[in-house]
Amino acid sequence: MKKTVVGLFAFFLALSSFSQTSIPKSTWRAALLRGHNEVVFGLEITPKSNGRYEAVVINGAERLPMDEAYLEGDSLHIPMLIFDSDLVVKVAGNQMKGSWKKNRNGVWVSVLPFKADKGEMYHFAKKPQATSHNVSGKYATYFQRPERKDSSFAVGILEQKGSKLAGTFLTPTGDYRYLAGDIVGDSLFMSCYDGSHAFLFRAAILPNGKIRGGMWSGISGYQPFTSTRDDKAALPPPTALTYLKPGYETLDFSFPDTKGNKISLKDEKYKGKVVVLQLSGTWCPNCMDETKFMVPWYKKNASRGVEILGLMFERSPDMKVSGPKIDFMAKRFGVPYPLVLAGTNDANAGQALPALNKVAGYPTTIFIDKKGRVREIHTGFSGPGTGKYYDQFIEEFNALISKLLAE
């Protein structure tokens, strides 16, 4: 009997260690586990006055706020609601353990195991290692898709300082956002987590400027890739993927906002103005990056005679399902321009705008002049993680708007 009482006491003592009433301000080396592979990122937890927590994910130079974190029972929830994502963990002293969950068809499912160590902030090498390798530069990259027996092209951008790495991969429809990691021996490791995507790049550094390895994504995604250093590597023009079908100059649509109001380019608000259509989705991290650019830009430039209209392509065509997500995104980023539900982000997306040959990717940005004519269609978005390519996008965006306003 005595042993039973002692055993029960030990059990409840252990259980209580996962049921802290508060978590102090702290930083953590966090990782999602794909077998023996780790998708590593930093995590910062700060208590708030309302008994909840501010949680910030750190991917290299990026500090990405999650939604307000909270304790429920013996678990800490760190959600990213626009991506139907939740880190659900139990805290025991200097460790967290739990899982990354995503919503699939209205059901929360466990996706990947999660762990974190308090006070640690390294990526893949706890102590920096001296290296003779220098992988900084631009790379022509081919991702092989075994299930389709073809390859997709990307431009890799790597920046090395000592044995530390940062970079991203640019594709015709967007970029892989902020990747960070290390060179360990003859291999490189980079990863990131943004609430929607979890990426790990692991590759061998080969002679003659080549890198060969694999990309792990999400719960089960994997693609081998080969990169070759090439200062002239470039993507096809972003204006070449989506275009107007012959015989069309304008777009004609009427889509509802979340309150049921139909919005059209024929509305008085848009007459005689330059209009930017943002084809977007609440599920899309690159769209999140573009929205972070669009919101302050619009506030600064709306008085010049320009409007932005967000056309949202969601997982569900049902406003009862997608409307709250759109409203939440608008609130989270302080979107001052209308967002409407235009359709779904699947093979049927092009039916919403039949004048287009297709919707090739998200985000897609359509520029319309004062007479209502489509003047340019830009597929994809080079976000702030791409460095000079982001600066180039801003410069070209402003130049095109100024040109259309001057006409």
Image (tube, rainbow, N blue to C red):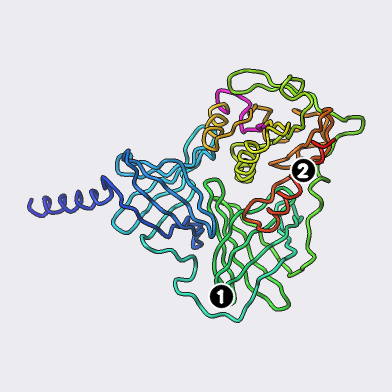
Can residue 46 be seen here? The reply is yes
- Neighbor class of circle 2 (other Cα within 10 Å; few <14, some 14-19, many 20+) is many
The residue tagged 1 is 162
First in sequence: mark 2 vs mark 1 = 1
Mark 1: few, some, or many residues within 10 Å (few <14, many ≥20)? some
Q: Does 207 sit above or below residue 246?
A: below
Residue 343, by quadrant, is: top right
Residue at x 64%, y 38% (from the top left corner):
300
- Measure how far apart labels 2 and 1 are at the Cα level: 37 Å
Q: Mark 2 points at which residue?
A: 378
Q: What residue type is labelled 1?
A: Gly
Q: In this view, does 236 lie above or below 299?
A: below
398 magenta-colored: no
Can you give x and y, in whole percent of width and height, for residue 42 in the image?
46, 57
Residue that protrudes farthest toward the left in the picture:
2
Most extreme residue toward the right is 247
Hey, which quadrant is residue 187 in on the image? bottom right
Q: In the rendering, at what x and y percent does residue 35 appear?
A: 49, 59
Regarding residue 146, the answer to whether it shows in the image is no
Front position in the image: 185 or 355: 355
- Disc number placed over residue 283 in the picture, else none: none
**What residue span does the magenta drawing correspond to?**
310-322
Residue occupying image coordinates x 69% and y 69%? 137
